[in-house]
Image (tube, rainbow, N blue to C red):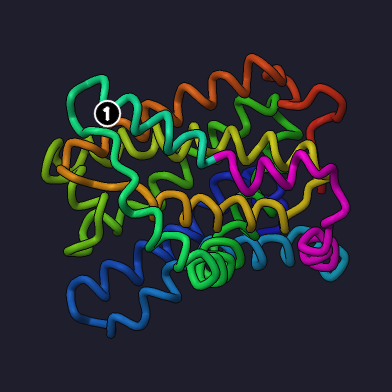
Amino acid sequence: MKNFVKKYPAVSMVVLSYAIGIGISILVINGVLPESMFFLAATSGSIAGITLTAIVAGKIGLRDLFGRIKIWRVSGRWWAFALFATLGVVICGKIINAILGLDPLDFSNIPQGLVMVVPIFLMQIITAGLGEELGWRGFLLPRMQGRYNALVAGLIVGVLHGFWHTPMFFVEGLSPYQDMKELMGLIPATIGYSLFFVASWSILFTCLLNNTKGSLLLIFVCHASQAWWLSLWSYNNPESIFGLPIAMTIVAIVVVLIYGPKNLSKTNERFVIED
């Protein structure tokens, strides 16, 4: 088992996280398990990451993994990146929607979003940060960067992470997943979401990781801030979802052009873990 995980970290991550996350979600959706079990499914990324780290690196690996949550002494510009990068994406997405005639510029949700900033941050740091990123950016990304350049590694992790979200398309009333499915169909929506949103977003995460000494705390903050900024997004009609992935792709391309595909950093080597 240990040798297999070392040789095939991506396969190991997919098999374990998908088995836990998608497996539990299917049982919940079909009424076999209570809805409260969705929380366990949502944390399957980190459950897999912690388990696989323990298998390949033992107590030392786990200490290093959790120790990266404590890394906070980094340049202020990377704190700003973690907090505000998604704001730029949201604004670009709104402008694209307006240009395409899908939605007028509308920031009416801002007052409500400002009120909800603290609870959304706390919830997302627990569910998305602790629940997902100990696996995708904690375990998998540093190992993929030992085999590929930062851009390729980030895209691989992003695509795998994107398809991990597939059960969301089956949960009634969960926007924007339901909007995408209704507009495009399940398969195009799932592929589009994974390739043009999560994979592009993963490039931003990879850049952040490589410029902050592998800090998972900054990754948690970035993931949480993404949820908050998106809460300010006004969905006046279902077609307004198209602007966001287009904007995310454009921003990701700009990041690659600025920081370069090798390390997604001008000053640091990409953060690598070699077992």
The quarter in which the N terminus is drawn is bottom right
Q: Which of these two is toward me, 70 or 251?
A: 251
Where residue 124 appears, as percent x and y from the top left, is 52, 65
Q: Quadrant of residue 104?
A: top left
Residue 32 versus residue 234 in the image, above or below: below
Is 26 situated left or right of 131 in this image? left
Residue 106 located within the stretch drawn in magenta? no
Q: Quadrant of residue 174?
A: bottom left
Q: Residue at x 72, y 51 (%)?
A: 3
Crowd tier of the residue under label 1, counting other residues whose Cα lies within 10 Å: few below 14, some 14–19, many 20 or above = many
Is 154 situated left or right of 71 in this image? left
Is 197 situated left or right of 68 in this image? left
Q: Which of these two is toward me, 256 or 146?
A: 256
Where residue 147 appears, as percent x and y from the top left, is 71, 30
Residue 84 located within the stretch drawn in magenta? yes
The span shown in magenta is 62-85
Judging by the rendered image, the residue that carries numbered circle 1 is 97
For the stretch drawn in magenta, what is the main secondary structure?
helix
Regarding residue 140, the answer to whether it shows in the image is: yes
The number of discs equals: 1
Is 217 situated left or right of 178 in this image? right
Regarding residue 47, the answer to whether it shows in the image is: no
Where residue 97 appears, as percent x and y from the top left, is 27, 28
Q: Residue at x 63, y 58 (%)?
A: 220
- The type of residue carrying mark 1 is Asn
Q: Residue at x 41, y 36 (%)?
A: 197
Residue 233 versus residue 115 in the image, above or below: above
Where residue 91 appears, as percent x and y from the top left, is 43, 34
